[in-house]
Image (cartoon, grey):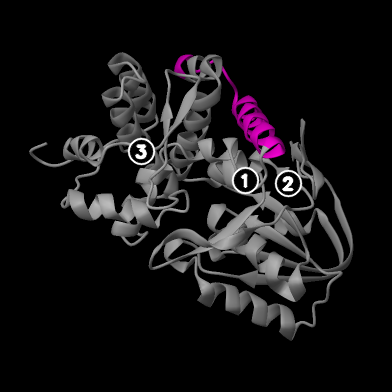
Amino acid sequence: MKVNISTPNKNYDILIGKLPEININSKVAIITNPKISGLHINYLINHLNAKEIHIITLPDGEEYKNFDSINYALDRLFDAKFDRNSILIAFGGGVIGDMSGFTASIFLRGVKFIQIPTTLLAMVDSSVGGKTGINNKYGKNLIGSFYQPEAVYIDTHFLSTLEKREFAAGMAEVIKMAVMFDKKFFENLQNETLKIEEIIKRSVELKADIVNKDEKEKGIRSVLNYGHTFAHVIENITNYNTYLHGEAVAIGMVMANELAVELGLLQKQEAKKIKNLLEKHSLPTYFEIKNIEEFYNHFFLDKKTMNNNIKFILPKGIGNFEIVKNIDKNTVLKTLKKFQKNG
């Protein structure tokens, strides 16, 4: 199965199926983490022919998605005398993919890279579309670049060793896209009528269509941030070490839905259906907010906030969306209070 990405700067394919033979006539650096390297590095190397193969191992986890990890990767590339013809391979989940892409975008002002995602979340979302970046103390992915890969290879072989919690985190991103863009897809997920390859393909098709229309998030691509405005605050408050990204997104979707219900965009029954589907995949749907003013103020560090105006991506029924600005602060606080112990 193949899905095409066509932006003003790059045209490439996302291939869904068994990993093909990859032939590269230059130096290659596989950027990965210890767990994926231990489980799958031989599988990748057996499908890779290159002039030289180097392996750069970075620690995995959002707390390591920082300049220290990037500098370590850059040092290894300089040590091995990589040049502008060299190619990087991102081999891991979303954290590795984001860091590898960012490294590729700044090493010698840009070298080619390939995405080989190993988690469901990376397969359906983060490996597609060219967003790269790292976190800092102010928030998630605030430092980064739009930098498209040469190709994305999605092989469900890697899901055989994926922990249930990681798989569920990927399903949060799948559900996100269904709620925003495709009611029939949402219903199919409810009824469990799709195989995993079909779920991945439909998710990638939806993501690719948006990226092709709006590569650098000037408009409709921001809709992919449904749930993320809340999720990024949760991740930042918990120092990126309590929830997987998809878990935080699941909670963020429920929070966004509550706001959408408050504004009359979403029926309570529809919000319940979304919450039930998330919980069906063992995803968390509640986060206790200890200080709602602090939580609210974190919104202003979000990349989508412009001129102190918070932008919320909200469902308008299931299968449609609305980008909402200028929401009264008290309306937002009323929603946040529902996530306090006595709310």
Quadrant in which residue 44 is drawn: bottom right
Looking at the rendered structure, the secondary structure element under dot 2 is strand
Q: Is residue 235 left or right of residue 140?
A: left
Closer mark to the observer between disc 2 and disc 1 = 2
Q: Residue furthest right?
A: 25
- Whole-number angstrom distance, CA of label 2 to CA of label 1: 14 Å
Q: Is residue 39 visible?
A: no
Residue 192: say if magenta.
yes
Tags 2 and 1 touching, CB below 8 Å = no
Q: Nearer the viewer, mark 1 or mark 3?
A: 3
Report helix, strand or loop for mark 1: helix
Residue 318 locus on image (x, y percent) = 45, 18
**What is the spatial separation of the Cα atoms under label 2 and label 3, in whole angstroms?**
38 Å
Vertically, is 12 above or below 39? above
User: Is 225 contained in the magenta span?
Assistant: no
User: Dominant secondary structure of the magenta stretch?
Assistant: helix
CA distance separating discs 1 and 3? 43 Å
Q: Label 1: few (<14), some or many (≥20) within 10 Å?
A: some
Mark 2 nearby-residue class (10 Å; few <14, some 14–19, many ≥20): many
Identity of the residue drawn at 78% across and 66% down: 111
Per the rendering, the mark at residue 158 is 1
The residue tagged 2 is 152
134 or 247, which is in the foreground?
134
The residue furthest bottom is 79
Percent from the top left, x then y, of residue 322? Answer: 46, 27
The magenta-colored residue range is 190-213
Residue matched to label 3? 326
Say which element carries label 3. loop
